[in-house]
Amino acid sequence: MDRNTIIGLLLIAGIMIGYSVFMKPDREQLELARRRQDSLLINQQNRDSLVALQPDTANPAQLQQPASQSLQNDSLLALQFGSFSSAARGENTKLVIENDLMAVTIASRGGMVYSVNLKQFHKYDNSPLILFNGDSSLFGFDFFAQNRNISTSRFYFTPSVNGITKKGDTLMLSLRLYADSISYIEYLYTLPPNSYMLGFKALFVNMNRYLPGNMNSIDLHWTSYAPKIEKGEKNENTYTTVSYRYFQDETESIKPKNKQTEKDIATKLEWVGFKQQFFTSVLIPEQPFLNGKVGYEYFDESKSNYLKRFYLQSALPFSNTESVELPMAFYFGPNHFNTLKKYGHELNDLVSLGGNIIKWINLYLIIPIFNFLERFIGNYGIIILLLTLIIKVITLPLTYRSYLSMARMRVLKPQVDELNEKYAKATAMEKQQATMDLYKKAGVNPMGGCLPLLLQMPVLFAMYRFFPTSFELRQESFLWAKDLSTFDSIFSLPFTIPMYGDHISLFTLLMTVTTIWSVKQSNQGNMSNQQMPGMQSMTYIMPVMLMLVLNNFSSGLTYYLFVSNIFGIAQNEILKRAIDEKKLLKRIEDNKKKPVKKSSFQQRLEEMAKQRGYKLPKK
């Protein structure tokens, strides 16, 4: 690049940084906007779920209402909800069932899971890890009864008289929504010991007296707000989405497109999960969902303590008889590959490992090596170091072939320069043909240095997918990095640089420096780059672009890239000393004296041509 281009790029960068500094709102404005946004979100949730309902407890003004007003309210509720009107008002009591792994709070309003506290984990600020809480969640069934639209999430369930009971080591909790003394909907929750799986069963007892006779399915809705849990909000948001598995088929996730993304699914679903970077809430029915509408709404990370609002609208098969059971289960827990695999249903697909060959590399190479090292080593920085070394050893034959090919090109450079002078006035096609003839006689493949490197690219992409979603690295420290699952900040900037962020990651800087060093080392022996100076500039610009992009990524990934660069530089130095270029040139000259061996394909073509009577040109 010339001086004017460099000055122009620096001016553009300065303008962007200046704009970010002067236009950025102060901290008080951001916090005020965030509180206002959260209040609006919760208020909207309450309006959607509790329309036409009375408050949990009566206030003094209500206590002073005349009897006629109270009777009028009762009549309105009876008109709106029919036999369920008595459950339209009540007190929202809460009961907690817990084991060693989680504490699940069940609310009488809606009979639903009110909050989940994962006891063995905490948020980035060391506060308890609440997967979701209170009014930010909504769950229930929707159906018609007595020609009225009934949603169970609107009503107050009655906990069983015995409260929380035990069957063996399993905790049980029952709540009922009564239509009359013998007709009710019962929610039965079961929590085994040492499990992230919460059993749930909805029983419809004698509800056929109220439901339509031709009813063969029942609608279900589930909404939950995803709170901020991890340090790197931008990185966390990337992996926060809705995942679902088609019945006896593949698992998919909604790819972020717009601020609100939704997908209609007309086929059966085995489960639906509200997934964050390291934790997921999954609903698994015993009979698959008949269809579904899934989606999320994205919130501005600077204005809210929530990342996204998830929602599911679906239908389950339903036979309208005296007693109907709808068994299900909730998984509330970490996106840990082996943990998810233990619960079946291919829940381990929630761990994002990439697609096709990238997924296979992670499944059968990266994860097994990582798990093996984890048995003996407790420091994940050392594990990443050894993992990098093992991968470098595995790919060493490819690296050797690549370096050997570049060495051959390097020793042939004087002869290539002679050809360029000889064919100075010839066309580009003639020059290229003469150069290719030289390579062919010498037994050198110009692409030999690129192909081995391309074969190593899937491993790099596999690492790119593995580290940001590796639960093992969450909140694990190494050197100055306090959490290998997010960025390592050694200095916070008073402003935000577009793409780069508002902090400086040391591992990212070290990765950038060693990448430039590695590129310089490679360019010294790369013929194609020497012949095209513009290509050399691009190879130096790319590390800087990577620095801008990876500054907010997992420090485990940038640390791996840094260590990989160090090993690569050392490998190249060792190979440089191991390969004697004088002996290599002598072997190439000997190859040029040998007749060029025809490939089997070329021999077959010539044989076919002879059989048809064609005369081959003499050389």
Image (tube, rainbow, N blue to C red):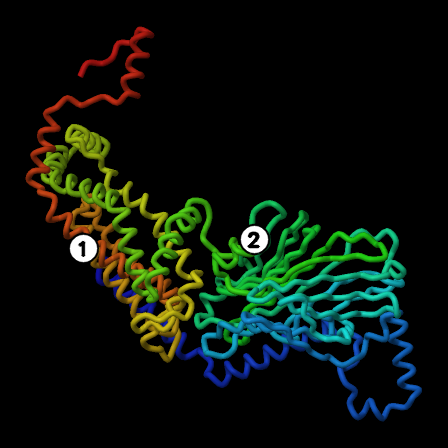
- Tell me the tag on residue 246: none
Left or right? Give the position of 500 relative to 171: left
Image quadrant in which the N terminus is located: bottom left
- Is residue 259 something that shows in the picture? no
Q: Foreground: 563 or 30? A: 563
Quarter of the view holding residue 45: bottom right
Q: Is residue 159 above or below residue 324?
A: below
The residue pinned by badge 1 equals 570
Is the residue under label 2 in contact with that under label 1 (CB below 8 Å)? no
- Please state the horizontal and vertical placement of residue 464, each as a whole percent of the image: 38, 56
Image quadrant in which the C terminus is located: top left
Q: Residue sitting at 88 percent across and 70 percent down? A: 181
Left or right? Give the position of 386 relative to 238: left
Dot 1 amino acid type:
Ala
Quarter of the view holding residue 454: top left
- Please state the horizontal and vertical placement of residue 564, each as a whole percent of the image: 27, 57
Q: Residue sitting at 40 percent across and 68 percent down? A: 486
Q: Residue sitting at 51 percent across and 83 percent down? A: 29
- Please state the horizontal and vertical placement of residue 118, each as a whole percent of the image: 54, 71
Q: Nearer the viewer, mark 1 or mark 2?
A: 2
Pointer 1 or 2: first along the chain: 2
Q: Indicate the secondary structure of the residue bearing disc 1.
A: helix
Quarter of the view holding residue 383: bottom left
- Please state the horizontal and vertical placement of residue 33, each as a whole percent of the image: 55, 80
- Is residue 333 something that shows in the picture? yes
Are there few (<14), some (14-19), or many (20+) residues within 10 Å of tag 1? few
The residue pinned by badge 2 equals 344
Left or right? Give the position of 481 relative to 533: right
Number of numbered tags placed on the structure image: 2
Q: Residue sitting at 45 percent across and 65 percent down? A: 235
